[in-house]
Image: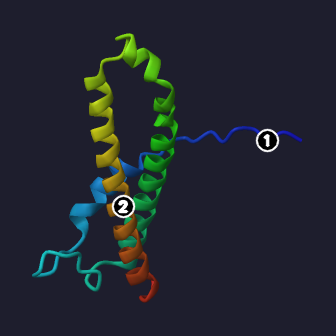
Amino acid sequence: MSTAPIIRAEPMLPMRQLLAHLPRLPISDNGAVDANRASPGLLRSVAEDAEATMSTIHQGLGAIGLLAHSAVPIEDGSIGADSLESLGFLMAELGDLAAACMTLAAHCRRAADHRPIS
């Protein structure tokens, strides 16, 4: 039995949704997210979007692993070494973003799970 692909009415845009939710989070005097003043629903949405963003980044970075096969094109000049260096910097920044998303998701989930849904 084959399964049909899932067709979504709207595309998943977790990073865009995360960026839209972030300004709605209350901030404490020390500049951190004040989870006690945020609604559990907002915290859960931020956590879900942050987790989906992290997953997307990890899957994309894994796909870029094809760089291991690029030694010959770099050597013959088909691909410039500066392009590969720029891609490395991008991968490092995306890795940092994924780590920040994981931390944010954990913080929001922990806070939301200890409060009733409003």
Picture layout, residue 72 above or below residue 99:
above
Which label lies toward us, 2 or 1? 2
Image position of 59 (left or right of 94) = right
Disc 2: CA contacts within 10 A as few (<14), some (14-19) or many (>=20): some
Callout 2, which amino acid? Answer: Ala
Compared across the picture, whether 5 is left or right of 61 comes to: right
Which residue matches tag 2?
99
Tell me the residue at 30%/18% (across/down). Answer: 80
- Nearest to N terminus: mark 2 or mark 1: 1
Report the amino acid beneath label 1.
Thr
**Residue nearer the viewer, 24 or 49:** 49
Against 44, residue 84 (above or below) is above
Q: Which residue is mark 1?
A: 3
Lateral position of residue 32 relative to residue 39, left or right: left
Q: At which x and y percent is residue 23?
A: 21, 62
Which residue is found at the position 27% from the left and 40% from the top?
89
Residue 59 vs residue 88, the one in the foreground: 88
Q: Is residue 12 above or below residue 76?
A: below
Q: Quadrant of the C terminus?
A: bottom left
Q: Quadrant of the N terminus?
A: top right
Residue that appears at 32% across and 33% down? 87
Q: Dot 1: few (<14), some (14–19), or many (≥20) neighbours within 10 Å?
A: few
Q: Is residue 61 above or below residue 87?
A: below
**Residue 11 seen in this snapshot:** no
Please state if 31 lies on the left or on the right of 37 as rendered. Answer: left
| Residue found at x 38% / y 16% | 75
